[in-house]
Amino acid sequence: MQIVTSDIELHVDDSLMRVYVASPKPTGRYPGVLLYSEIFQLTGPILRAAHRLAGHGFVVAAPEIYHRAVPPGLVIGYDDIGRMYGNDLAKRTSVGAFDADAKATFDYLATRADVAPGQLATMGFCIGGPLALRAALDPRCRAAACAYPTGVHSGKLGKDADAGTLKRLGELKGELLVVFGDVDPHVPVEGRRTLAAALAAAGVRHTILELPGEHAFMRDEGARYDSAMADRVYAETVALFYRTFGPRT
């Protein structure tokens, strides 16, 4: 499916949040997907992820997660300096601010003429994993895919020592897909077990995939990339969304 792209701006609190939107070109009504980046914001791999999902028949909105602290359009490099900068920006952003961004993006998607009513989902990578899980607490969100989500097991998110996400898992209304690399040092085995136990205890409909990969193995730049594993995760994610909303034709 061919797609079209655009940049839009949303007012959130006292800030202007730029959002990259990729949507199917054919006229129709499609599910809307809130797509969360890594700590590096809207890099090439994230834009290509948006394009890939849009090509399967979804209207994808990817917000700049640090819009309160940096100018619009800032993309952080995949290097040691960029990693330190991205982590510092994360530590300066509150969970409340992230939650406000999610609500604003879902509100925007819900107003688009090409988004089907009641069909909202989310996906995220790295820090975007716990952000997608937080977004899924919105009762409008019917499905979520979290790729190697960092910090959920410990509660740490942004500047908050404990976001309280694990305690709220019972609020999830939709189905959840969680993906880990088996040698990911950022989400150790104990952390994966903690999240799995919490999801089971909360009665959340979920699937956990633990694949032979490193952290960020879906990022199609750099030595960590595993195309076969990335393809599998995208296939599982699209299947989840199709199962939730029905296949696109």
Image (cartoon, grey):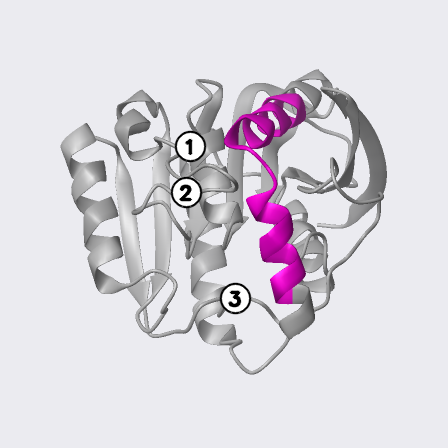
Q: Main secondary structure of the magenta part?
A: helix
Vertical position of residue 50 compared to residue 213: above or below? above
Q: State the residue lying farthest toward the bottom.
A: 223
In the picture of the structure, the residue carrying the numbered disc 3 is 218
Residue closer to the observer: 177 or 196:
196
Question: Is residue 234 in sight in this rendering?
Answer: yes
Left or right: residue 224 versus residue 137 is right
Disc 2 secondary structure class: helix
Rounded to the nearest angstrom, the CA distance separating label 1 from label 3 is 23 Å
In the picture of the structure, the residue carrying the numbered disc 1 is 244
Q: In this rendering, which labeled residue sits more in front, label 2 or label 3?
A: 3
Residue range highlighted in magenta:
83-106
Vertical position of residue 9 compared to residue 132: above or below? above
Left or right: residue 73 versus residue 47 is right
Disc 1 secondary structure class: helix
Give how far across and how far down residue 16 sits, in percent: 81, 29
What amino acid is found at the position of numbered circle 3 in the picture? Answer: Met
- Identify the residue at horizontal 55%, vertical 83% (top origin): 223
